[in-house]
Amino acid sequence: MTVQTTGSVATAIDSARWPAVARAPRGPSSMMTGRIADSLLRRAVAKLPIRLEYPDGTVIGAADQTLPTMMIHDAKALSRRVGRFGLIGFGESYMAGEWTSNDLAGVMTAFANSVAELIPTALQWLRPLAVVRHPRSMYNSLTQARSNIAEHYDLSNDLFAEFLDETMTYSSALFDTSRPGWADLADAQHRKIDSLLDSARVGPGSRLLEIGTGWGELAIRAAARGAHVHSITLSAEQQRMAQQRVADAGLSDRVVIELKDYREVDGLYDAVVSVEMIEAVGYRFWPTYFHTLDRLVSPGGRVAIQAITMPHDRMLASRNTYTWIQKYIFPGGMIPSVEAIVGITERETRLRTVGVTSLRADYAETLRLWRERFLARREAVSALGFDDVFHRMWELYLAYSEAGFRCGYLDVYQWTFAPTGSDL
C-alpha cells in the first residue's frame, strides 16, 4: 500500500487496487510535459470563470472568491499526470486527492464549455503524447461485453440504492418543471418511463422487449399496463434484484428477465424499448445494435430508445481516444452523435424517426440530485467497502456528467422509430 499525503488531503491509496492513482508519473519526460501542462492550465483558468488556489497562497484567475475554485494540494503531481495522460491524468489526480474543489460541478462545467480551446492550435501536436492506447476491453465481443457491464453494474446493488430514488432508475428523469427537486425524482422517473412506453404504444397484450433491464422499474410499469415483458440484462446483480422487485409487485407471470446479450435475442415484438443502452455497446457495434432493433420489432411495431449524444465533431475526435470515463466508469462505452444514429438507421435499417424529445436539462438536474445524495451518504458507502479513492472517483463521474449536460456538450433524447411501411 502506498501512503500519499497531498497538502491538506491525507490518503492511503491501495496500490494493488489503484495502481495508476497511487503514484504520479516520474522521470525527465514527465517533468517536461508536466511543465507544459501546468502552463496550459494556468493559461486556461485565466480566461475561465474559475480560480486556482495553490498551497503557497498563489491564486490564478478572477478575484471573485465565490467562483468555483480548484484547490491544488500537489501541483507537480497534478501537472505530471495531465502532461503524461491528459484528461485521464486530470481525473486520476482528483482521485489521488492532489486537488479538490468547493464546486466540482462548476469547475467541470467551465472546462467543458471551453473544451475545444483548452489547447492552443500551435500546441495541438502535443496531443499524441497524452493519448493512451485503447485496451482490448474497448471491443465488446459477447464475452467482453458481459465483463464490461459487470464492472460497473455489478459493483453492488446496495451502492446504487444509496443515491438512487426508490424506483432504482439509473437514467435521466423527466421532471414536471413546476416541481423540480429531490422530492419529485421518483415521480419524474415514472414520467420518463411512461413517456417511453406511450411512444412505443405499450398497452394491454403488447409483447414488449426491453434491452437493458436496470433494476426492473420499466418492466414493472409496462406489465402493470397489461403488457407481456421480455427483459434482458448482462448484470447478474441487476437481474437478481429486478426479479425480486417484479415478484414483490405480483407481476412475475407477465415479466421474464434473462441474463442475455441483445445479439442473442430472437422473435418479434410489438415494442422494443432500450434506455441508455446504446452508449455501452461501443462504436463498432452501433450498426449491430440498430440491426438488432430492426430485426426484433414487428412491421407495425415501435422502437423507443433513450440515448445520450455528443456533437458529431467531438464524437469523431474522441472515438479513437481512451478516456477517463472508459477507464474507470464505463469500459467499452462510447457516446454517439445524432448524425451517427440517423445515418445508421436510415442507411442500414427499416427504422425511421417518428419522434425525438430532448431531456438535457432534466439529466443535469437528475445528476445533481444523485451527486447530492451520494455525498450525503459517504459513511454508508464506506461501510459497504468502498474506499476514499472510489468515493472521489464516483463524485467526479457524477459532477463530470452533470457538467456535460449543463453546458450542452452532452444531450439525451427519447427517440421513437417505426419500421418503414408501418402506419406512422
Image (cartoon, rainbow, N blue to C red):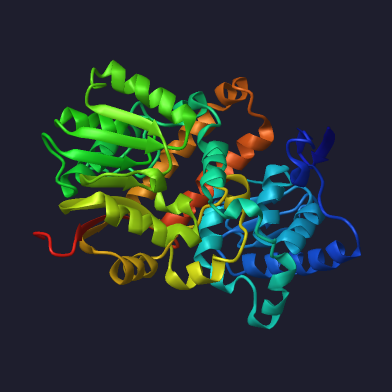
* Quadrant location, the C terminus: bottom left
* Quadrant location, the N terminus: top right
Q: Tell me the quarter of the picture where residue 329 sits.
A: top right
Q: In this view, which residue lies farthest toward the right?
A: 28
Q: Is residue 253 above or below residue 102?
A: above
Image position, residue 119 (x, y; %): 64, 73
Asked whether, in this view, residue 187 is left or right of residue 369, the answer is left
Residue lying at 14% horizontally and 30% vertically, measured from the top left: 226
Image position, residue 133 (x, y; %): 69, 61
Image position, residue 319 (x, y; %): 54, 65
User: In this orientation, which residue lies closer to the viewer: 339 or 261?
Assistant: 261
Residue lying at 58% horizontally and 54% vertically, measured from the top left: 138
Q: Tell me the quarter of the picture where residue 45 sits.
A: bottom right
Asked whether, in this view, residue 179 is left or right of residue 66, the answer is left
Q: Is residue 132 above or below residue 261?
A: below
Q: In this view, which residue lies farthest toward the bottom?
A: 122
Image position, residue 147 (x, y; %): 57, 40
Q: Tell me the quarter of the picture where residue 266 sits.
A: top left
